[in-house]
Amino acid sequence: QKEVEQNSGPLSVPEGAIASLNCTYSDRGSQSFFWYRQYSGKSPELIMSIYSNGDKEDGRFTAQLNKASQYVSLLIRDSQPSDSATYLCAVPGNSGYALNFGKGTSLLVTP
Amino acid sequence: EAGVAQSPRYKIIEKRQSVAFWCNPISGHATLYWYQQILGQGPKLLIQFQNNGVVDDSQLPKDRFSAERLKGVDSTLKIQPAKLEDSAVYLCASSWGQETQYFGPGTRLLVL
């Protein structure tokens, strides 16, 4: 089983600050990594995917991957109260398609 | 494009009863997944279908859970008999191969 570890939080940041969410994974052979956002009572939605070492930016979101350290992070710049949600890190499992999720990090952005 | 449809949205049953959930994936998506999400945890895969064949059911409690996707389109997940620890949200997702998985709204199950 490919394990994914996340700090459950909650992580509290003031509006306008940078939120930094972290994730570690157990399988050194993992090739792709996903960040999902899940609002309370809703289903997960994909916000970022990353496959190569380094940074990938999409609007206010930046995913960072360090395969040597088996570490992937998500930065949210100019955090807004609407970013308050649980952020789930995921890697493909043994079948290559289905995802193994971490427990998620709860983010609270305070006005 | 219509999203993943699931029904019912909520279900309350007593332990030892049976329950069934239905999922209709996005049109054209060959891969369908059922995940179980217990409160405070991330989703956990129960079963993955490719068309109407099972790819991975290693985490499905087969003594009480069953799932089928007979025509390679919609799918049904059944629990019989239910236990208290089955209380969770059951999420159906679909994808075109290894591409992005799209999740349905989920079915919230409470077992009393």
Image: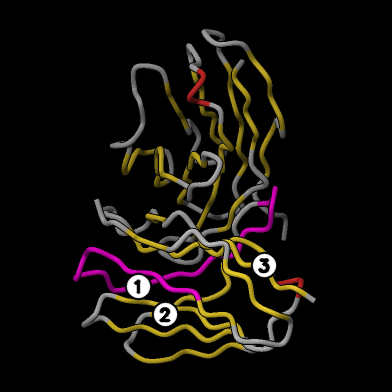
First in sequence: mark 3 vs mark 2: 2
- Amino acid identity at mark 2: Ile
Mark 3 touches mark 2? (CB < 8 Å)? no
Q: Is residue A30 highlighted in magenta?
A: yes
Q: Nearer the viewer, residue A108 or B92?
A: A108
- Residue at mark 1: chain: A
Q: Residue A76 occupies which quadrant of the picture?
A: bottom right
B100 in relation to B32, above or below: below
- Residue at mark 3: chain: A
Residue indicated by mark 1? A32
What secondary structure is found at the residue carrying circle 2?
strand
Residue A107 at x, y percent in the picture? 61, 67
Near mark 3 (Cα within 10 A), the count class, few <14, some 14-19 or many ≥20, is many
Q: Residue furthest top?
A: B16
Q: Nearer the viewer, residue A102 or B26?
A: A102
Is B87 situated left or right of B5 in this image? Answer: left
Quadrant into which the N terminus of chain B falls: bottom right
Quadrant into which the C terminus of chain B falls: top right
First in sequence: mark 1 vs mark 3: 1
Residue indicated by mark 3? A108
- Residue at mark 2: chain: A
- Amino acid identity at mark 1: Ser
Which span of residues is magenta-colored?
Answer: A21-42
- Amino acid identity at mark 3: Leu
Mark 1 touches mark 2? (CB < 8 Å)? yes
Is A19 situated left or right of B48 in this image? Answer: right
The numbered mark at residue A50 is 2
